[in-house]
Structure formats: C-alpha cells, structure tokens
Image (spheres, grey):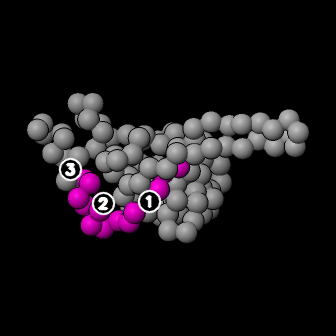
C-alpha cells in the first residue's frame, strides 16, 4: 500500500466518522419522447460518505456561489468523480452538482472530492 492510498483510507475514515451517508446519482443518459416532447434523465446510484459544510458568507457572490449553496467533502471510496449533470442526495434533499469539482489527488491517487452543490 502506498502512502497516498493510506491517506485516502484516513480521509475516508474521518468522513465516515464525522459525516453521513450520501448517494451520488450519476447521469447515465437522456431519452427523448417525441410523442410528449419530454426528456428523461436516467441515473445510476453510487453510495458514499460525505461531510456537508456551509460556505463562508464572504464567498457568496450571487453568481458562482449563491445563498443556500453547500460544499460537500466526499470520500472517493465507492464513488466516481462527480460531474456536471450529476446529483447528490443528502438525507431527504437532492442537490445538483455545480462544476468544477476539486479533486485532491497527490501522485494521482484521489483522496478527496470537494463538491459545490445547489438546490
């Protein structure tokens, strides 16, 4: 085991201890029904662990960071890197992933995903 994979395990342990279970809904495609004119997005669910953090009020600019936005520190264990179009379910709330996602990956080993989410 490498030093960075050990750090990923430590990060996962801390997020599991102090965070909560989350579900990453990974957008896996859109289907269009020409009869109704409606589009339906399908998702594949991945379960992981995350800690929800409030943005510092000084960072809320109304554009990049809006009132109500949150930061979620996600363990990469069991989930893929969140991307635009994905959703994050925390408790009973569903949040939209706001790109870009910050990946902490020293030596190419993902240790932490920092994700901005918005309702």
Q: Residue at x 49, y 63 (%)?
A: 90
Q: At numbered mark 1, what does the secondary structure look like: helix, strand or loop?
A: strand
Q: Residue at x 71, y 36 (%)?
A: 31
Mark in the foreground, 1 or 2: 1
| Residue 89 within the magenta-colored segment of the rendering | no
Q: Which residue corresponds to mark 2?
A: 15
Q: Nearer the viewer, residue 111 or 48?
A: 48
Q: Is residue 93 left or right of residue 106?
A: right
Disc 1 from disc 3: Cα separation: 18 Å
The quarter of the displayed image where residue 38 is located: top right
In the image, residue 53 above or below residue 2 = below
Q: Nearer the viewer, residue 95 or 68?
A: 95
Q: Residue at x 49, y 50 (%)?
A: 45
Residue 7 in view of the camera: yes
**Tag of residue 9:** 3
Q: Residue at x 85, y 35 (%)?
A: 34
Picture coordinates of residue 58, whole percent (x, y): 52, 59
Q: Say which label, 1 or 2, has the lower sequence index.
A: 2
Residue extending farthest front:
35
Q: Is residue 83 left or right of residue 50?
A: right
The residue segment tinted magenta is 11-25
Q: Is residue 13 left or right of residue 55?
A: left
Q: Which residue corresponds to mark 1?
A: 22
């Amino acid at each position: 085991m490498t030093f960075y994979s050990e750090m990923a395990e430590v990060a996962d342990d801390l997020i599991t201890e102090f965070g909560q279970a989350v579900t990453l809904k990974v957008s896996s495609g859109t289907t269009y029904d020409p009869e109704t004119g409606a589009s339906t997005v399908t998702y594949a669910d991945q379960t992981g662990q995350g800690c929800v953090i409030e943005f510092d009020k000084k960072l809320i600019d109304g554009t990049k960071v809006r009132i109500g936005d949150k930061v979620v520190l996600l363990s990469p264990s069991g989930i893929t890197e969140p991307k635009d179009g994905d959703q994050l379910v925390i408790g009973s709330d569903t949040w939209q992933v706001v790109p870009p996602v910050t990946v902490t990956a020293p030596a190419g080993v993902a240790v932490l995903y920092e994700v901005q989410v918005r309702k």
